[in-house]
């Protein structure tokens, strides 16, 4: 499925549904133990990473750095959650 079709479907959803879904997955990632939480956070990281690549050309350098830092922190937390006992 192409990016345009996926983004078109997401854009058709109400903003409240988009935000609530994102919030539920993030909270599940934080509160689920071990690999389950890490997988939820990894899903969020993949979506954020894809949105970062799509908006890279129009972002300012400062915004790029901030978004990369947030993405790196999310990936680091997901890895910590997956491999800590």
Image (tube, rainbow, N blue to C red):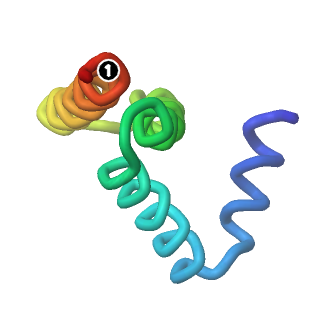
What residue is disc 1 on? 79
Badge 1 local density, few (<14 within 10 Å), some, or many (20+)?
A: some
The C terminus appears in which quarter of the rendering? top left
Outermost residue to the front: 85
Quick check: 25 above or below 36? below
Residue for point 69% across, 74% down: 13
Q: In x, y percent, where is residue 33?
A: 37, 42
Q: Classify 14 as above or below 39.
A: below
- Residue 41, position as x, y percentages in the image: 41, 39
Query: In the figure, is residue 42 to the left or right of 1?
Result: left
Q: Is residue 68 left or right of residue 33?
A: left
Quadrant (top left/top right/bottom left/bottom right) for the N terminus: top right
Left or right: 80 in relation to 46:
left
Q: Residue at x 82, y 34 (%)?
A: 2
Residue lying farthest to the right in this orientation: 1
Residue drawn at (53%, 38%) of the image: 43
Residue at 42%, 41% (x, y): give it.
Answer: 37
Question: Relative to 50, does residue 30 appear above or below in the rendering?
Answer: below
Q: Quadrant of residue 63?
A: top left
Say if 14 sits above or below 4 in the image: below
Report x, y in % for residue 65.
16, 27
Numbered label tally:
1
Q: Return the residue nearer the eye: 3 or 17.
A: 17
Query: Is disc 1 placed on a helix, strand or loop?
Result: helix
Can you give x and y, in whole percent of width and height, for residue 4 in the image?
77, 43
């Amino acid at each position: 499925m192409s990016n345009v079709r996926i983004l078109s479907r997401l854009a058709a959803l109400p903003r409240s549904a988009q935000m609530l879904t994102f919030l539920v997955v993030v909270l599940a990632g934080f509160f689920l133990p071990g690999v389950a939480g890490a997988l939820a956070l990894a899903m969020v990281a993949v979506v954020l990473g894809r949105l970062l690549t799509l908006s890279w050309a129009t972002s300012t350098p400062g915004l790029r750095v901030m978004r990369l830092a947030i993405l790196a922190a999310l990936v680091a937390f997901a890895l910590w959650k997956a491999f800590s006992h």
